[in-house]
Amino acid sequence: MRKLISIFAVAAMLIFALSAAVSAAELQNYCKKATILEVSAATDANPATNAIDGKSDTFWASGKVDTANITVDLGKPMPVGYIQIIWGDDYAVSYGIGTTSSAEAVAASDVYKSEGGTDEITLDSITTMRCLNFELYKPSGANGFSIKEIIIRRTVDATEAAASGYPSSGVTPPDGSYIIKGELIGLEEGWGGNADAGRAAAFDGDINTYFDPLGTGDGYAGVDAGEQYILTYIVIHPRDGQLPRFDGAEINGSNDGENWELIWISEGEAEEWTWQEISADQFKIKEPTFRYFRYFNEFTHGDVGEVELYGIPVDGTVDWLPVEEEIIIEEEAPAAAPTEAAPAAAPAAQAPASSPQTSDMTALAVAAAVMALGSAVIITKKRR
């Protein structure tokens, strides 16, 4: 439903939307896909899942107890270097954290002090963890403990998606298909411990950078889409100077991140240093439907410049697509002369649809133009 609003209100809304988008900049949070393995106490109105639901207006409450624990299961071993606890009104004056790479809760080995608010813990080194057990020893008051949110990342500023310049091939995928984005999985560091040759290089939009595994069949670069996609198209760019290493290149799919199925395999070297496009009729599986996808090679060393995977989301929605604001500028009709009929109002000029990467900046530019012209603005919302 359209709603006519003032120019200044539009500008304020757009600036606020931009600042909110920047502050939320797709920061990594493993808890988005985590579960609660166990909790010692909780009130009916404030269950333990509230501590990992990504919402600041909900919280887990233990009720009136002197000690409590809550264990977060990330679902699989993940590299962790940063932990954040956002406390409710009732925080733990002292607490401990026990971690393990398996699906079990273990006793705390590190103890921390708190004064409430937000606690940020940066570990000395990035450690592989699956379960984190938070043991709360001493409540700040008589009502036990409460936690609004637990956030777990690889680093304090780690992001979950591919670089903003990705994808870069410019191909037109099959109808209804989208680039498959998500959390990067696989080797963080490539050959020789080189972070620049890790998984991110295969999804950064730059054909001159490259993923370089530890050896033949040793390591992969992939993506956790967060939901199931039907893979429809593959685009790969070989590494410059290493065209023979395209022989044996594979794209695999998995629904648990551990057991992989072969979707496609290269049966020869790349003939040119250019984009290699693979359509669905070359797949080993008809309509491969998976949540996890990876680039892998068990026959040659397997370097690769770029990997682009396109597909159709099974549930019909694409999580990374933003809700855009479509801005329509309408000029006011000039005042009619007393003895003449009023001229027809100028037709509304609609701003062109923006790409996901440029929509915020375009919106601000349009808002500035609207303010300068003194025009009325109509805003509608749509999902692209």
Image (cartoon, rainbow, N blue to C red):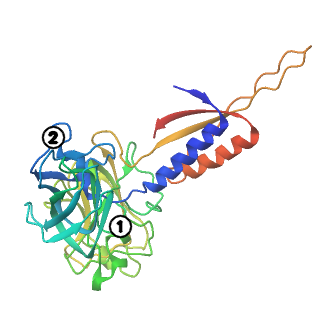
Q: Residues within 10 Å of mark 2 (few under 14, many from 20)?
A: few
Q: Residue at x 42, y 74 (%)?
A: 273
Q: CA distance from mark 2 to mark 1?
A: 31 Å
Q: Earlier in the sequence, mark 2 or mark 1?
A: 2
Residue picked out by circle 1 = 156
Q: Residues within 10 Å of mark 1 (few under 14, many from 20)?
A: some
Picture layout, residue 332 above or below residue 199: above
Q: Is residue 287 visible?
A: no
Picture layout, residue 243 above or below residue 37: below
- Image quadrant in which you'd find residue 198: bottom left
Q: Residue at x 38, y 62 (%)?
A: 162
Q: Secondary structure at mark 2?
A: loop
Q: Nearer the viewer, mark 2 or mark 1?
A: 2
Kind of residue at disc 2: Thr
Quadrant location of the C terminus in the rendered image: top left
The residue closer to the viewer here, 94 or 276, is: 94
Please tell me the numbered disc located at residue 43.
2
The residue closer to the viewer here, 162 or 82, is: 82
Kind of residue at disc 1: Val
